[in-house]
Amino acid sequence: MTRVFPNNMAEVAVTRTTACGGNCGNCESCIFQSELKAMAKNRVSARPGQKVLIESKSSKVFGAALLVYILPLVFFLAGFAIAYSLGAAEGVCVAVSFLGLAAGAAVVVASQRLKKNKNPISFDIVELI
């Protein structure tokens, strides 16, 4: 945990591991920030510098993952299926499927912009480690 705020909130730093096991000295190909900061409800009165366990509602995390990863894929496959059922040539089917993928990505971006601050994923500090 990095900081404590009024109203029982705290800023936590979450270290993200990489596909190579977190040892970036081996491949030096990491382009992502390895530490993310998030706000969490401080249920255990943790203080800065303490390691904590945080939780969130799985349904919100899975819903976000479904939206980001699955919806564009569904649009991609639907685009191909629709073009194929209309008798389009293979190249046209592929082009339409990529247009579907782009449409799916646009839906994801638009939905995230619309509900940006309405119902964010919340985190709770539940235990000191």
Image (spheres, rainbow, N blue to C red):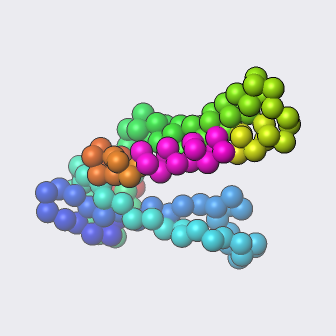
**Residue at position x 78%, y 37% in the image:** 93
Vertical arrangement, residue 69 with respect to residue 11, above or below:
above
Q: Residue furthest right?
A: 90
Relative image position of residue 22 (x, y in whole percent): 64, 65
Relative image position of residue 66 (x, y in whole percent): 53, 37
Quadrant placement of the N terminus: bottom left
Q: Residue furthest left?
A: 7
Instruction: Find residue 79 and report its image quarter.
Output: top right
Name the main secondary structure of what is drawn in magenta: helix
Vertical arrangement, residue 66 with respect to residue 50, above or below:
above
Relative image position of residue 110 (x, y in whole percent): 43, 48
Q: Nearer the viewer, residue 119 or 113?
A: 113
Question: Does residue 66 appear to the left or right of 58 in the view shown?
Answer: right
Quadrant placement of the C terminus: bottom left
Question: Does residue 88 appear to the left or right of 12 in the view shown?
Answer: right
**Residue at position x 25%, y 52% in the image:** 41
**Residue at position x 54%, y 44% in the image:** 68
Residue 54 appears anywhere in the view: no
Question: Does residue 46 appear to the left or right of 90 in the view shown?
Answer: left
Instruction: Find residue 31 and report its image quarter.
Output: bottom right
**Residue at position x 49%, y 44% in the image:** 107
Q: Nearer the viewer, residue 72 or 37?
A: 72
Vertical arrangement, residue 73 with respect to residue 38, above or below:
above
Vertical arrangement, residue 86 with respect to residue 40, above or below:
above
Please give the count of numbered marks on the rendered protein: 0
Relative image position of residue 56 (x, y in whole percent): 38, 43
User: Magenta stretch: residue 102 in it?
Assistant: yes
Residue range of the region highlighted in magenta in the rendering: 99-111
Residue 17 appears anywhere in the view: yes
User: Magenta stretch: residue 61 in it?
Assistant: no
Q: Nearer the viewer, residue 127 or 10?
A: 10
